[in-house]
Amino acid sequence: MPIQIGILRHAIAEDTASSGSDFDRRLTRSGASELQEHIDLLERWAWAPSVIFHSPYVRTTQTAHIVASRFEAVPVLPTDLIVHGRPDEILRLCVGHPAPLLIGHEPTMGELISHLLGAPPGATPLARAGFALLDVDRLPTTRPARLILFVPPRLVSTQE
């Protein structure tokens, strides 16, 4: 059975000067609003995550919980692999889940998309609040994924 993997980069966060550290950066109000627009799009697309894996950073934790609040009974699991893992390690998290959502940072999320598509590393950077939905035959993958949806933030947001 195919697996639809959602990959989301966290929404716009405050700068490091406001938070004191990169780990503690929180979403801005416009970032949270932009994220709600993405979730509206996912609901219209009729895709819902079966599990959410996210980086333990504050902005990705906030992003994960905002997404989860719109979908009933979705497990939300932090993991350092989203920050420091290689694509094959991150994808192992998805085994057994029909629609995992991975929420993290660049360059890791873009490299994961490139890996799944069989593209060179760095070929598919993901902007803040960017989202990709990919269909894979199984995990571990045996052929390149099929890109179902790629949403840069400017397509759904009216804010900068």
Image: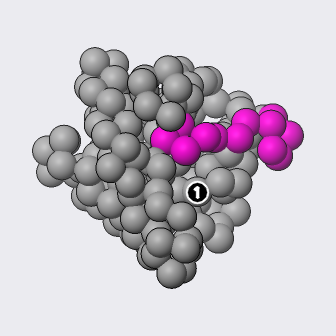
Q: Nearer the viewer, residue 81 or 130?
A: 130
**Between residues 140 and 37, which one lies in front from this camera angle?**
37
Residue positioned 82% across, 46% down in the render: 121
| Crowd rating for badge 1 (residues with CA inside 10 Å; few <14, some 14–19, many 20+) | many
Of all residues shown, which one is farthest toward the front? 17
Horizontal side of 67 relative to 86 (left or right) equals left
Q: Residue furthest bottom?
A: 20
Q: Nearer the viewer, residue 92 or 16?
A: 16
Query: Where is residue 149 shown, x and y percent of the image?
Result: 52, 22
Q: Secondary structure at mark 1?
A: loop
Amino acid type, residue under disc 1 in the picture: His
- Residue 126 position by quadrant: top right
Residue 137 is left or right of residue 55, and the answer is: right
Identify the residue at horizontal 50%, vertical 20% (top origin). Answer: 155
Question: Which range is magenta?
Answer: 119-130
> Residue at image x 27%, y 56%?
65
- Reading the image, the residue beneath label 1 is 105
User: Is residue 125 within the magenta segment?
Assistant: yes
| The N terminus sits in image quarter | top left
Can residue 41 be seen in this snapshot? yes
Colouring chosen for the image of the structure: one colour
Work out whether 81 lies above or below 47: below
Please tell me in which quadrant of the rendered image residue 47 appears.
top left
- The secondary structure making up most of the magenta span is loop
Residue 114 locus on image (x, y percent): 73, 40
Image vertical order of residue 156 relative to residue 112, above or below: above
Residue drawn at 61 percent across, 40 percent down: 127
The image position of residue 2, as x and y in percent, is 47, 30
